Amino acid sequence: MASHRRARPLGQHSTVAALSRTAATLAAATAAVLATGGSALAAPGAPGGPGGAPVTADGVRQQVDGLYAQAEVAGQRYDGAREQERSLQRESVLLQQRVAEEQQHVNTLLQSMGSIASAEYRQGGGVDPLVKLLLNAHPDQYLEQASTADQADAVAALKLQEIESDQRQLVQDRAEAVAQLAQLESLRQSIAGSKTQVQQRLGHAKALLDTLTAAQRAQLQQNEDDAAGAAAQTAEQPPQSGQGPASARAAMALAAAESALGKPYVYGSAGPGSFDCSGLMYWSWRHAGVTLPRTSQGQAFAGQRVPLSQARPGDLVIFYGDMHHVGMYAGHGTIIHAPYPGARVRYERVGDMPVAEVVRV
């Protein structure tokens, strides 16, 4: 997302230029969503102002800004739910394996007790009190009713405790496995809902931007390219003394982010061919041997907070009060980030969005 992130006034720019960071790639944005397997929902009716008056270009810009912001918030929810889903799937597989092993152990115990009972019956025409104790459906009641020490000696008690403990653990783990499967289903519904929200908002944004002329859209694209080029020239200047990356790992992460320049934004993607905002940070820092949380909100707490005035290349810059966007500081007041669906990884001025936190990993 971009246009909704401008933190300062538009100044001398024309109304068309003000739209450059919002509208230029909307068609591509919608195509990117469709490529993920969904379809953008049509906007409810033709866009229009009060009383059916035509919407101004500035009005379109403001509405699309909000839709992009909502789409990215939904995208970060999608990322978080996917991360939870993967973690829970791993835990569920391990738990189900443990349940299977516990069940096999209980089955083995029961089989051995059955063999003992059969042998006792064949040899003496009956079952020894000890075996009765072990096989009793209610062994606690049997123990309470036992009248002699021979019927409940220490060996029997210990064996009984082992069997009961195994059975209790099995029941508990089975219940936990069922709960995990229910949680997985809930997460999958959340993932589907977040994806639908992204599609709806991008579809509505496209309907709004379709009210602009081809000439306006071409101008918007040119303005956006010019702004990205200017930010790139600034970022590529040699760092001032003492203003380079704060660590060797930060330098490696920055180099990885730079290698992703020009790759498309796709929500829910963490490389190598496409990225969303937090996915780019996750992928870049993995190249430095560091595993970050998957969402921008999680990444906001992944290191030491520093003032923006002390930001160094490789630091994470978290934007907006709800922390729904993140980029990497690239030096000279610029960042590298994946802006919004349909756009590509690029440089941008850090002041174009309201900064919430700067995090040094």
Image (cartoon, rainbow, N blue to C red):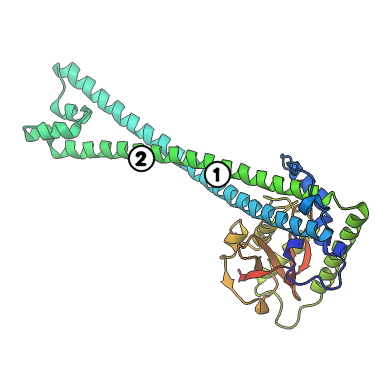
Side of 298 where 70 appears, left or right: right
Q: Which residue appears farthest toward the front when viewing the image?
A: 51
Q: Which residue is mark 1?
A: 187
Q: Secondary structure at mark 2?
A: helix
Q: Which residue appears farthest toward the bottom when viewing the image?
A: 241
* Quadrant in the picture for the N terminus: bottom right
Q: Which residue appears farthest toward the right when viewing the image?
A: 215
Q: Nearer the viewer, residue 125 or 141?
A: 141
Specify whether residue 270 is in view: no
Q: Would you place residue 200 above or below residue 111 in this image?
A: below
Side of 167 where 120 appears, left or right: left
Side of 107 where 267 appears, left or right: right
Q: Would you place residue 139 above or below residue 7 in this image?
A: above
Q: Which residue is mark 2?
A: 172
Give x and y (percent) for residue 148: 6, 33
Q: Nearer the viewer, mark 1 or mark 2?
A: 1
Q: Which residue appears farthest toward the left when viewing the image?
A: 147
Q: Amino acid at mark 1?
A: Leu
Residue 19, quarter of picture: bottom right
Give whichever of discs 1 and 2 has the lower sequence position: 2
Q: Would you place residue 90 above or below residue 292 in this image?
A: above
